[in-house]
Amino acid sequence: MDSTQLLKGVLDVAVLATLQRGDSYGYAIVTQLREAGHERVGEASVYGTLRRLADDGAVSSYSAPSASGPNRKYYSLTPHGTEQLHDGTKTWRHFAETMHYLLQENQR
């Protein structure tokens, strides 16, 4: 099974969960997701997700100076984003429990 297809379905929740740990900029979010095990996550996918989440009001953004070049665009979780993360977490847990049950049944 191609894990990139699974990630597409939960990328919003993964990005929101990353931002729950603190404000961050796009490439740092990509790096955190890759370090967490999503090695194949694409930068374009994450930046597109951030734009969509910003348009939806789930994240806000601001510019801050960077020691290594131009200002960086940082993203932070909004109260609406926290709600989305909570809802997405509940949905993911239900899905994972259902799959675990089905896969256990399949092994009997």
Image: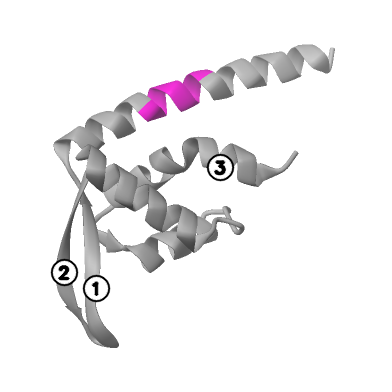
Q: Earlier in the sequence, mark 1 or mark 2?
A: 2
| Residue designated by label 3 | 7
Task: Say which residue label 1 marks.
Answer: 72
Q: Nearer the viewer, residue 38 or 107?
A: 38
Residue 80 image-quadrant placement:
top left
104 left or right of 39 in image = right
Find residue 50 and report its horizontal and vertical position in percent.
Answer: 33, 51
Dot 1: element: strand
Crowd around label 2: few <14 · some 14–19 · many ≥20 (10 Å): few
The residues bearing labels 1 and 2 have C-alpha atoms spaced at a distance of 5 Å
Which percent across, then down, holds residue 102? 70, 14
Specify the segment rendered in magenta: 88-94
View extreme (right): residue: 108
Q: Is residue 52 left or right of residue 92?
A: left
Q: Amino acid at mark 1?
A: Arg
Mark 2 = which residue?
A: 63
Q: Residue at x 66, y 14 (%)?
A: 101
Residue 29 image point, x, y percent = 39, 60
Mark 2 element type? strand
Mark 1–mark 2 contact, CB under 8 Å?
A: yes
Dividing the image into 4 quarters, which one contains the C terminus? top right
**Cα separation between marks 1 and 3:** 26 Å
Residue 14 lies, in percent from the top left, at: 43, 44
Q: Is residue 20 left or right of residue 93?
A: left
